[in-house]
Image (cartoon, rainbow, N blue to C red):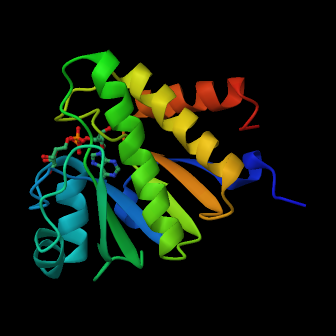
């Protein structure tokens, strides 16, 4: 029997680079050249080889993702997902969902059994956090319903407010006890 979805979702508050999962996702820009926020943390922790590897795969338009090794990170892979720079919820909703779905698809193709996501686009790119949380959770649930891999998805929140938001929504959906 398939593992129930609630056993395949985790919520974590803290630094994504500390997580020991097969793949961590970073919220990148289309040049994949590193930057601030979670991308800065991922590049700092992985070491300078990461920027060489990621830039070789650029450009990466919003809504897409690219995969590299994890270098000095505990994670085997870094998935560089590019979310939308927020302008308008109607058009940017789909682009944000695509950034999550592309990341999940790359994880599956590379046999990554576990993946951790930051709250893509909600920092420098200005996506409203409540809508971003809904889109992230809905997209992941949809993926998990129809795919066995990755088997485990961690939502990694860096801000306590985001953690509270995810906790509330996941609890409402019966996916967190
Ligand atoms: N671990 C997990 N989440 C983190 C960490 C961390 N160490 N640090 C920050 N966050 P942002 P964006 C959260 O700005 O909005 C970069 O310069 C943060 O609290 O990192 O997609 C890129 O190169 C927020 O919830 O990404 C791009 O140019 C979330 O990560 C641009 O920023 C996303 O914030 C991408 O902007």
Apparent side of residue 141 relative to residue 56 in the rendered image (left or right): right
Figure quarter occupied by ligand 1:
top left
**Viewer-proximal residue, 90 or 43?**
90
Q: What percent of the width, then of the height, locates residue 156?
A: 45, 48
Residue drawn at the location 21% of the way across and 52% of the way down: 28
**Residue 17 visible within the image:** yes
Quarter of the view holding residue 42: bottom left
Residue at the right extreme?
1
Q: What percent of the width, then of the height, locates residue 126?
A: 21, 27
Apparent side of residue 14 relative to residue 8 in the rendered image (left or right): left
Residue drawn at the location 14% of the way across and 51% of the way down: 30
Residue drawn at the location 76% of the way across and 31% of the way down: 174
Apparent side of residue 146 relative to residue 64 in the rendered image (left or right): right
Apparent side of residue 137 relative to residue 100 in the rendered image (left or right): right
* Number of marks: 0
Q: In the rendered image of this protein, does residue 46 appear above or below residue 102?
A: below
Q: What percent of the width, then of the height, locates residue 145?
A: 70, 47
Q: In the rendered image of this protein, does residue 69 appear above or below residue 145?
A: below
In the picture, the quarter occupied by the C terminus is top right
Q: What percent of the width, then of the height, locates residue 9?
A: 65, 49
**Viewer-proximal residue, 158 or 170?**
170
Residue drawn at the location 59% of the way across and 71% of the way down: 113
Q: In the rendered image of this protein, does residue 147 appear above or below residue 62?
A: below
Q: In the rendered image of this protein, does residue 125 appear above or below residue 157?
A: above
**Residue 19 visible within the image:** no
In the picture, the quarter occupied by the N terminus is bottom right
């Amino acid at each position: 029997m398939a593992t129930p979805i609630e056993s395949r979702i985790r919520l974590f508050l803290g630094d994504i680079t500390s997580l020991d999962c097969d793949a961590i996702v970073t919220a990148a820009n289309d040049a994949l050249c590193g930057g601030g926020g979670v991308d800065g943390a991922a590049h700092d922790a992985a070491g300078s080889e990461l920027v060489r590897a990621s830039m070789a795969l650029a450009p990466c338009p919003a809504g897409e993702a690219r995969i590299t090794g994890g270098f000095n990170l505990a994670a085997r892979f870094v998935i560089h997902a590019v979310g939308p720079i927020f302008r308008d919820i109607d058009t940017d909703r789909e682009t944000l969902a695509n950034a999550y779905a592309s990341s999940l698809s790359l994880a599956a193709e590379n046999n990554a059994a576990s993946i951790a996501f930051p709250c893509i686009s909600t920092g420098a790119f200005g996506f409203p956090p409540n809508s971003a949380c809904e889109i992230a959770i809905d997209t992941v649930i949809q993926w998990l319903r129809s795919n066995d891999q990755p088997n485990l998805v961690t939502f990694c929140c860096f801000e306590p407010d985001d953690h509270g938001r995810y906790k509330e929504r996941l609890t409402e959906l019966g996916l967190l006890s």
